[in-house]
Amino acid sequence: MTAMRKPPQRGFCPSEFALRLQKMQSILQAEQLDAVFVTSPSNIRYFTGFDSQFWESPTRPWFVVVPREGSIIAVIPEIGAPEMARTWVDDIRTWPSPCPEDDGVSLMAATLSAVPRRFGRIGAEMGREMALRMPVADFLALRGRMPETEIVDGTPALWRARMIKTEAEVAHIRFICEVASDAYIGLPDLVAIGDTERTVVKRLRADMCARGADNVPFMPAISGPGGVPQIVCGPQDRVLTHGDVLFIDTGATYDGYFCDFDRVYAVGAIDDAARRANEAIWEATELGIRAARPGVTMESVWKVMAQALQDAGSIGNNVGRLGHGLGMQLTEPPSFRAGDETIIQPGMVLTIEPGMEYAPGKMIVHEEDIVIMDDGAHLLTIRAPKEMPVIS
Amino acid sequence: MTAMRKPPQRGFCPSEFALRLQKMQSILQAEQLDAVFVTSPSNIRYFTGFDSQFWESPTRPWFVVVPREGSIIAVIPEIGAPEMARTWVDDIRTWPSPCPEDDGVSLMAATLSAVPRRFGRIGAEMGREMALRMPVADFLALRGRMPETEIVDGTPALWRARMIKTEAEVAHIRFICEVASDAYIGLPDLVAIGDTERTVVKRLRADMCARGADNVPFMPAISGPGGVPQIVCGPQDRVLTHGDVLFIDTGATYDGYFCDFDRVYAVGAIDDAARRANEAIWEATELGIRAARPGVTMESVWKVMAQALQDAGSIGNNVGRLGHGLGMQLTEPPSFRAGDETIIQPGMVLTIEPGMEYAPGKMIVHEEDIVIMDDGAHLLTIRAPKEMPVIS
């Protein structure tokens, strides 16, 4: 085990939250919204710093209102008030919950109705890569209570804000990327041929936590001769066998921020076809990292990688894209895919994730995490070696 | 560390899923629904057995349709097809995702439109203690595509099915309750006065995983002199100090099923007021366990506990209820609260969770998990000792 890395300070100072509010408010102004209200854990944490594992309980809805002008308002169940009071938020309104008859709906209607009006439009998490964390029936009831207001999709505005990370956010993501990188490098010393996929995950997860990860909510591991049939499920009880490719992906967290990158290992010796495919995917990753720079579209970077994979003999890729945004969620917009015209900007944190099925049922996928700066992409992960590390 | 317990077989046999389908279909018939469609991880897993950590990525929606007659239909992104094919589900329909322009909406509209009609009503996860895992904008678009069908709240039907656990489900919950109980009992050997709350959680979580838990998504820990100000957030860097009460709650999982119960510890010696409050809450738990039996309402059990807490000098409880259902979610319906008229039935798994603030800012809460059988409640957890175990 390498030496422990020094984690960045937990939490963010009030000036960081003031900056986030200011950024959001100028976006609200530009998108002609009087406010946006959020219900999901990452959005609530982004604006308030409020952190809780209590999100595991889906019983009570929580709300945070970001008005176009003025301060943030938390509208939350009584059970959460003592802890919300420790954040930078001053305006905290509560109701006794659970209360199926009216779980925050009338309090939210009153709160939103009192927000200063100019455009008559309020945004909600109605769109992509977010989910509204409240009963849809209550959402429709809330909308019905406010006939004078148009409740519209606030997702584009929210993603415009969250897509560009601050330096402090990048420091969080870099730390967890480095922790996971160190653990990946050490894995061949922790497992051996004959171990099951489940054992691999158990040891690697424990090692990442020992190195400083808070948790590892996402760690699929799949093994198969020369490649794997899919990359999102597992581990199973399958035993690592000579000639296998072992694929592991990791979404570990530190203080609310994710890494998301995979590694592939050769179990004993893999055949030439697998070795060639692996090298081609490694090269496609290089091309993607070099192509990702301010001013170009996500699609243009996708094209470079897709072409390289096609030239290398790809027979398919069911992932649907070759990388994506990363931050408080394992996956965020934008996507490296055909049709994503988002312009890459400094402050974006992205994953470069080329992969292909090079023979039926044999998929290999690589992934690195990068931050975009004025001069191009900088790695947050420790770059995977060109040849697969060997588990023996 | 005590000996490892033998975990129940992972997964469920096809006959169990056939039973769940049959139960759901008779409920659909009774509630005059032609189908229910689900999008959330626990509902999809309940009907199909499909398990994935990929739910961490909110980018792609997934759907499972349970028709009133016939077989289950999975409508999912291509990336998930290989793994869904390993479940008992035969009818799997896919589309290439992510596809912001039409992420499953038209395929779902076609699928739902082809379901045999009798009532013209289809249920969706619109109600309580569940969240729709798809963009609400897409949900509204789907509804708009099917003007001849009423999309109604399917939550009551889904909870009617999931609320009554099968023997195999109870065996899963019992195992994870026992694993967590063993770890709680061993905790005083793992930590000491001077450790931080964060250290306590790190060690206890690692110990639970070593004992057989798959993961521990929920483990708030809070300490305070004689009691704690809240019970849902933390851990923080606070150092355990003589006279503290340390409160820890745990939602650990085994094969998709949760335990949910807390324990309190005395750090060194606690004062008499804390000791008296703790004993009263322990007694209220006894009363709750004895009162919870088939045929009585949830409210009636709540009353027994609430009265005992009031008699013991409670000055408040911001939790809003005194226990709840438990299963594939950390919290499920029904609730031990005023107004919950749900009749307790054999097969329900419930938490008995009385607590009170006995002095300003000093809360103590107990919790046990039970299964209801014909003859009354049976403990799934190893009952907490009447006096707090001591951390020295």
Image (cartoon, coloured by chain):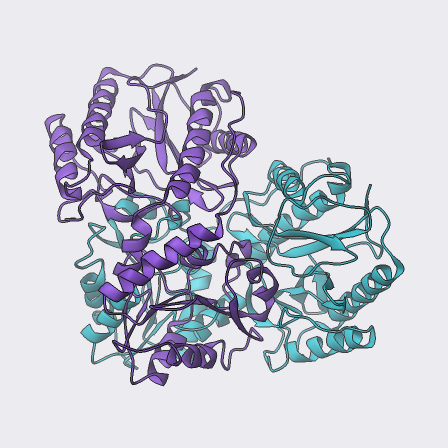
Chain colours: A cyan, B purple
Residue B132 appears in the figure: yes
Between B254 and B272, the one nearer to me in the picture: B254
> Residue A378, located in which quarter of the rendered image?
bottom right
Front position in the image: B342 or B85? B85
Q: Is residue B388 above or below residue A189?
A: above
Picture coordinates of residue B120 (x, y %)? 27, 78
Which residue occupies 18% across, 64% down? A106
**Which quarter of the rendering shows the C terminus of chain A?**
top right
Residue A80 vs residue A8: left or right? left
Q: Nearer the viewer, residue A225 or B265?
A: A225
Q: Position of residue A179 (x, y in %)?
A: 66, 45
Q: Is residue A171 left or right of residue A20?
A: right
Write the residue at 74% across / 38% down.
A191
Where residue B8 sits: x, y (%)?
49, 37
Residue A101 placement (x, y as % from top left): 16, 58
- Furthest-right residue in this view: A272
